[in-house]
Structure formats: C-alpha cells, structure tokens
Amino acid sequence: MPVIVEAPAQLSAQDRQDLLRIYAEAPAELLAPFANGEALIDAALAAGTLITGRFNDRLLGAAWLQRDADAWRLSRLCVRKVTRGRGVARRLLEQTQQQAVLNGRPLRLQAPAGYETAQSLATHLDLALENH
C-alpha cells in the first residue's frame, strides 16, 4: 500500500472528516489529555506536530511528531480500523524515521504503558519506545 506521509499545515474539509474518523476509533489513552479527537487535531495543527498517512486521496492514519533537539518523538499514532493490519502505521513510522535520520536525530515512539501494538511496532522497526 503506497501510503504518502504528509505534515499538513491546513486541512481540507475531507481531510478533517477523515481525521475525526481516525481519532473517533482511537483508544481514550491516545487522546489524553484532550476531550476528543477534534480538540487533539486542532492542538496538533496549532503546534505544527500533525503528520498524516494518505492513500488514494484519503487520510488513513495520523500521529503527532515532536522534533526535539535530542530526538524526534512520534506519539498518538492511530489508523482507521478498516485499514489496520495493512502497513499504514509501519509506513508512517518508516518514512518518519528516514526523515529523522536525515536530520541527525533518532526517532522514538511514545505510547501509553502496556500498549502492545506500539511495543510490537517499536520492536519490528528497532525504535526506542517511551511510555507516558
């Protein structure tokens, strides 16, 4: 699946609708401290931390990417349920990891403690996992 990773500064109406669907299916611990997906999306856009995975003009996954001085940290990674297991999250992580390396920074995956999906992805891609 050729997923294109983007860091949108603005969203089309369709993009916003796709993101709302993505985060409506997210576990509550990925949304914290935000009340809902809309608040999370608005905060990510304002902070410039939103990255998305696009396939056939639709957003299938999204995450927050903080570009810190010591490392890049990817968190709040979520993929639509109907497309899970098809490599969307892996592609988001791989492309982000490539960009981090090009910028001389390691990529670290952040996830709530005990979040097995994040542990599996981190192990598969040889990424450091930080629990929060």
Image (cartoon, rainbow, N blue to C red):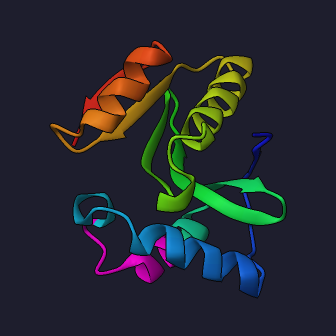
Q: Quadrant of the C terminus?
A: top left
x and y percent of residue 24 in the render?
41, 75
Q: Is residue 82 left or right of residue 127?
A: right
- Asked if residue 49 can be seen in this view, the reply is no
Residue visible at 78% across and 81% down in the picture: 12
Residue visible at 54% across and 46% down in the picture: 65
Q: Which of these two is toward me, 66 or 35? A: 35
Q: Is residue 116 left or right of residue 21?
A: left
- Asked if residue 85 can be seen in this view, the reply is yes
Residue visible at 63% across and 59% down in the picture: 60
When asked about the image quadrant of residue 128, the answer is top left
Q: Quadrant of the N terminus?
A: top right
Q: Which of these two is toward me, 23 or 107? A: 23
**Residue furthest out toward the right:** 56
x and y percent of residue 87 in the render?
60, 36
x and y percent of residue 83 in the render?
57, 53
When asked about the image quadrant of residue 55, the answer is bottom right
Residue visible at 71% across and 75% down in the picture: 15
Q: Which residues are magenta?
A: 32-43
**Residue furthest out toward the bottom:** 13
When asked about the image quadrant of residue 121, the answer is top left
Question: Measured along the vertical axis of the image, is residue 45 above or below residue 78?
Answer: below
* 125 is within the stretch colored magenta: no
* Badge count: 0
Question: Measured along the vertical axis of the image, is residue 127 above or below residue 6?
Answer: above
Q: Is residue 111 left or right of residue 8?
A: left
* 35 is within the stretch colored magenta: yes
x and y percent of residue 129 in the render?
33, 26
**Residue furthest out toward the left:** 114
